[in-house]
C-alpha cells in the first residue's frame, strides 16, 4: 500500500506532465498558423485614426486552435479531472454515498441499474433495429444498429481494460489504489464500469440519431446514462473514477460505431454509382465486345 504522501506526489507529477504537453501542443499550433493579410492598418489609416493606433491593433495576434489542438485540450482536461478525482475524490465520495444510503435510493438504483446491463440492452438494440426494418423507419434502424455496434465495441474495450488493471472494487477495500495489474490473474475488475460504458454507448447512439431534430433527446439520454453510473457508485460496486472511465469508453465507442456506419453508407453509395456497360459490336467478318466501367 502506497502512503498518502507518495500517492499525492505521483498525482502531482502526472498533472504537471499533462499541463506541459498541453501548453507545448498549443505553442506548436500557434507557430504553424499561416500569416494573415494586414488589412487593419490600411482601414484605420483611411479612417483618420493614425498609423500608431493602426499599427498597435495590427500587431495584436490571436492564437487559433486547430481541431487537433482542441481535441488535445479536451483530452488533457479530462485526464486532469480524472487524476484529481483519483487522488482526492474517490474515497470521500465512496464514504459519503455509503453513509447516506436510504431505502428510497436503493429502490431507485435497482430500477436504473439494469439499463446498463449488456445482456438487456444488446437484445433491446437488436429489437429496435428489427422494428425499424419492419416499419421501414430508417432512423429507428440506425439507432438500433448503432446502439448494438457500440455496445459490442464497448464490451470489448472494457473487458480488455479490466483484465489489464484488475482494480479492487470499493466493496472489497476502503482504499482506491489497489491494482493487481496485468501480470496476475485476478477476479477484481472494477476499472472501468461496464454498466456505465453500455449506458453511455446507447445514449450517445440515440442522441446522434434523434438529437438534431429533437433537442430534448440528448439531455434525456445522457441523464439516464448518468443515473446508471451514479447507481454503480451508490451500490458500492465502483469507484467514481471507474464510472468516469466507463462514460468515456461508452461515448467513444458510439462515436466510432457512428463513423464506421457513415463510411459504410458512403462506400455503398459509391458502389451504387458504378455501372458496368457491356456493348456487343458486331461486324461483317468479325465481332467484338466492349466493356465500360462508369464511376
Image (tube, rainbow, N blue to C red):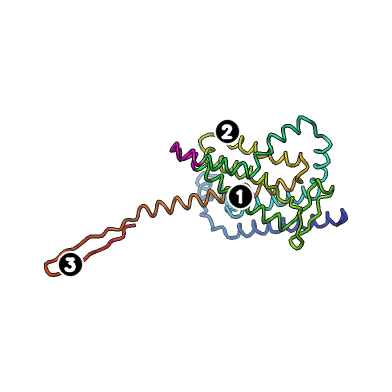
- Of all residues shown, which one is farthest toward the left? 284
Q: Residue at x 80, y 31 (%)?
A: 102
Quarter of the image containing the N terminus?
Answer: bottom right
138 drawn magenta: yes
* Residue 46, above or below 23: above
Of circles 2 and 3, the one toward us is 3
50 drawn magenta: no
The crowd level at tag 3 (other Cα within 10 Å; few <14, some 14-19, many 20+) is few
Reading the chain from its start, which is encountered first: label 3 or label 1? 1
**Separation of disc 2 and disc 3 at Cα?**
66 Å
Reading the chain from its start, which is encountered first: label 2 or label 1? 2
**Residue 76 relative to residue 153: left or right:** right
Q: Residue 215's spot in the image, x, y percent?
A: 55, 34
**Separation of disc 2 and disc 1 at Cα?**
21 Å
**Separation of disc 3 and disc 1 at Cα?**
58 Å
Magenta stretch, residue numbers: 129-141
Q: Which residue is mark 2?
A: 216
Q: Which residue is mark 3?
A: 287
Q: Which residue is mark 1?
A: 252
Q: Residue 90's spot in the image, x, y percent?
A: 79, 46
Q: Residue at x 24, y 64 (%)?
A: 290
* Residue 130, above or below 293: above
Amino acid at each position: 500500500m502506497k502512503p498518502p504522501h507518495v500517492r499525492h506526489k505521483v498525482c502531482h507529477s502526472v498533472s504537471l506532465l499533462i499541463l506541459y504537453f498541453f501548453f507545448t501542443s498549443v505553442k506548436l499550433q500557434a507557430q504553424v498558423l499561416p500569416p494573415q493579410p494586414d488589412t487593419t492598418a490600411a482601414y484605420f489609416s483611411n479612417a483618420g485614426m493614425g498609423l500608431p493606433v493602426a499599427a498597435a491593433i495590427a500587431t495584436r495576434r490571436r492564437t487559433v486552435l486547430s481541431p487537433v489542438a482542441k481535441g488535445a485540450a479536451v483530452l488533457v482536461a479530462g485526464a486532469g479531472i480524472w487524476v484529481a478525482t483519483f487522488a482526492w475524490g474517490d474515497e470521500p465520495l465512496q464514504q459519503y454515498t455509503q453513509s447516506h444510503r436510504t431505502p428510497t435510493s436503493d429502490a431507485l438504483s435497482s430500477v436504473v441499474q439494469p439499463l446498463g446491463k449488456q445482456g438487456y440492452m444488446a437484445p433491446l438494440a437488436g429489437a429496435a433495429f428489427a422494428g425499424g426494418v419492419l416499419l421501414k423507419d430508417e432512423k429507428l434502424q440506425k439507432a438500433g444498429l448503432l446502439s448494438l455496434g457500440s455496445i459490442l465495441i464497448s464490451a470489448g474495450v472494457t473487458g480488455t481494460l479490466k483484465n489489464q488493471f484488475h482494480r479492487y472494487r470499493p466493496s472489497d477495500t476502503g482504499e482506491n489504489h489497489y491494482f493487481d495489474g496485468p501480470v496476475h490473474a485476478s477476479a477484481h475488475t472494477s476499472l472501468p464500469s461496464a454498466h456505465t460504458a453500455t449506458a453511455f454507448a446507447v445514449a450517445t447512439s440515440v442522441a446522434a440519431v434523434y438529437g438534431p431534430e429533437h433537442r430534448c433527446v440528448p439531455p434525456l439520454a445522457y441523464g439516464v446514462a448518468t443515473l446508471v453510473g451514479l447507481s454503480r457508485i451508490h451500490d458500492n460496486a465502483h469507484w467514481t473514477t471507474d464510472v468516469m472511465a466507463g462514460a468515456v469508453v461508452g461515448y467513444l465507442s458510439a462515436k466510432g460505431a457512428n463513423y464506421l456506419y457513415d463510411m459504410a453508407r458512403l462506400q455503398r453509395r459509391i458502389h451504387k454509382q458504378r455501372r458496368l456497360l457491356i456493348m456487343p459490336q458486331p461486324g461483317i467478318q468479325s465481332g467484338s465486345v466492349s466493356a465500360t466501367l462508369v464511376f
